[in-house]
Amino acid sequence: MDRVFNFSAGPSVLPEDVLKEAQSDLLNYKGSGMSVMEMSHRSAVYQSIIDEAEASLRQLMNIPDNYKVLFLQGGASTQFAMLPLNLMVGSKKADYVNTGAWTKKAIAEAKKFGEVNVVASSEDATFNYVPKLDPATFTKDADYFYIASNNTIYGTLMKELPDTGDVPIIADMSSNILSEEVDVSKYGVIFAGAQKNMGPAGVTVVIIREDLIGKADGACPTMLNYETHAKANSMFNTPPTYPIYVAGLVFKWLLSNGGIKEMERKNNVKANLLYDYLDNSDFFKGTVVKEDRSLMNIPFVSPNADLDAAFIKGAADKGMVNLKGHRSVGGMRASVYNAMPVEGVEALVAYMKEFEEANK
Ligand code: PMP
């Protein structure tokens, strides 16, 4: 079977060039006589792989020198606990914006460690919008302010950062990191699981301002303390060596394809193709309010669940897979991460037209 257009929300499509490079390196990485999977993480050759991955990410995102880049394990979900463990240590209060299932999980976890103030929520409308934020409701002495910049399940994107004064903003960027330019200096911590826009599942990237490291109290488990990993340059224990290597290849691929600016341009082209079609169709409908729509995850519905199922099956027969919406919302969802070529979205829209004609 040929490769399909994979619209999975994650793990998701990777650039074909990256997969080919990994394939050519598989048995013998650059004359080392072994696969990256077989290498000691303490070897010089592996050190250069992780160093290059970090350098490429720093270049891509323009990460200031006073930020550490950590390559951790445990998925983005482990950060839900690691953040309060490390940062809810002053007033023991934190503000959270509740924009979906992932922020709900983060909130539940943070409540174990301190006082959580949910400053705004869009749960009243199945999270199909990003709530307006009123700084008057923010906790003045909060240890941090938490957002998910992109909500993978519902397809919403927070387009403007709130003004939190000196309170550091923590952003879960799992599903939109590297999709558009961001000013890292506006954040205290950015974290993201790799398996959407960066590489295979198994590594979680944490970009953390240095003054936020070293605050956890003595009861914090060693492996959950940012200081442990920052001091050891992500080598306190065995890091997820192979996912870091592939993420490094993805970072290089991004650099040699115009960087984030060019990705942002292409992502707008792709998303607009789909949104324009949805806005003009009497049959398919996007489910998110216009101004909050994500560039990465695009949910939509047909007139009923039976047609949704028929559409998803028909698309799969044409080599367009993983279009089923998240089980909590139903319908369809097209995830169009950096590695999804514009041809994939064109093929999807062409099929939507065909399906609409046949079923309206
Ligand atoms: N945050 C967001 C926005 C996500 O989309 C996901 C996973 N889809 C997670 C957190 C959880 O990530 P992980 O499975 O790596 O724990």
Image (spheres, rainbow, N blue to C red):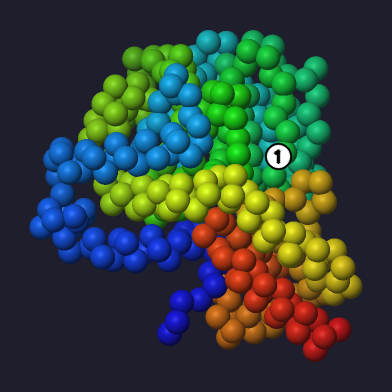
**Residue drawn at the location 73% of the way across and 65% of the way down:** 274
The answer to whether 15 is drawn above or below residue 96 in the figure is: below
Q: Horizontal placement of 57 versus 230: left or right?
A: right
Horizontal placement of 334 versus 70: left or right? Answer: right
Q: Residue at x 62, y 66 (%)?
A: 342
Image quarter of residue 306: bottom right
Answer yes or no: is residue 247 visible: no
Using the image, determine if residue 342 lies above or below residue 189: below
Instruction: Please name the residue shown 78% across and 37% down the image.
Output: 131
Relative horizontal placement of residue 299, taking residue 324 as reference (left or right): right
State whether residue 94 is above or below residue 287. Answer: above
Residue at 45% from the left image edge and 82% from the top image edge: 2
**Residue nearest the observer in this picture, 79 or 242:** 242
* Nearest the eye: 350 or 327: 350
Residue 185, image x, y percentages: 56, 23
Dot 1 falls on a residue whose secondary structure is loop
Q: Quadrant of the N terminus?
A: bottom left
Identify the image quadrant of residue 124: top right
Residue ranking furthest to the left? 33
Q: Which residue is mark 1?
A: 158
Disc 1 residue type? Met
| Picture quarter with the C terminus | bottom right
- Tell me how many marks there are: 1
For label 1, count other residues whose C-alpha is less than 10 Å away and answer few (under 14), some (14-19) or many (20+).
Answer: many
Residue 158 percent location from the top left of the image: 70, 39
Instruction: Please say if 271 is above or below 127.
Output: below
Can residue 119 be seen here? yes
Q: Farthest residue toward the bottom?
A: 358
